[in-house]
Image (spheres, rainbow, N blue to C red):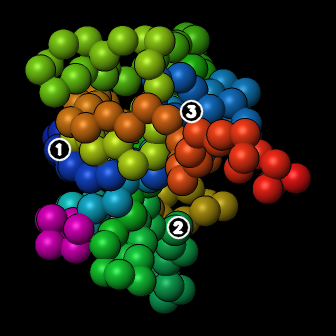
Amino acid sequence: MTRSMTNKIYTISGETKYPWLTQPDTQFNSDGVYHTKLIVNQDKAQEHIKVINDVISKEIAKQHQLTPDNTKPVNRAPLPYKVLEDGAVEFNIKMKASGINSKTKQPFTQSPRIVDNQLNEFPKEKNIFGGSIVKINYEPIGYNVASTGIGCTLRLKGVQVVKLVENSNATQGFTVINQNELESLV
């Protein structure tokens, strides 16, 4: 497996979908992953799509240099974005919460730095729910893995919460029920 880092950080803004930013998601990975899907309007997404495609193109060029006479098409991993029906683009941005460094073989833990819209540290006890508007710093990382193929991952670096949504839509539309309404519901 090879990885190439760009060492360039990009900033993207949009609406969170299924965010795990203040605590790691351990459902499918016991080491934990901080992640979110970020919904970005089509116009603002284009520069980020170009960055991703450029990173993938460089990985493909490297593979062709390693195997110049190979006529087989390269295996491509899934893209870290998809275009939605309404034209908006959904980016998948993530960061491992812990693991073993592949170079130093030392264990590590990390979390994204999160600030509010005044650049103050975001309170650890608050959760960022879907629908929040955020700016995210990410680093595009190209990779070439035999089992998955050539691709790019968007490594989460930091988050600025522009507009916080703190609760879910699970109770949206509910109202206080008086005694008369209660009797008519049962």
Q: Nearer the viewer, residue 168 or 172?
A: 172
Does 131 appear above or below 74?
above
Magenta extent: 41-47
Q: Is residue 45 magenta?
A: yes
Picture coordinates of residue 78 (x, y %)? 52, 68
User: Would you say 23 lies left or right of 92 here?
Assistant: right
- Secondary structure beneath label 3: strand
Which amino acid type is shown beneath numbered disc 3? Val
Q: Nearer the viewer, residue 116 or 53?
A: 116
Mark 3 crowd level (few <14, some 14–19, many ≥20, 10 Å Cα): many
- The number of discs equals 3
| Residue at which label 3 appears | 33
Which residue occupies the extreme front position in the image?
180
Which amino acid type is shown beneath numbered disc 1? Thr
Q: Residue at x 26, y 32 (%)?
A: 161
**Marks 2 and 1, the one that precedes in the sequence:** 1
Residue 54 in view: no
Q: Residue at x 61, y 62 (%)?
A: 148
Q: CA distance from mark 1 to mark 3?
A: 20 Å
| Residue at which label 1 appears | 11
Picture coordinates of residue 39 (x, y %)? 34, 60
Q: CA distance from mark 2 to mark 3?
A: 19 Å
Does 4 appear above or below 62?
above
Does 153 appear above or below 155?
below
| Residue at which label 2 appears | 77
Picture coordinates of residue 83 (x, y %)? 38, 76
Which amino acid type is shown beneath numbered disc 2? Ala
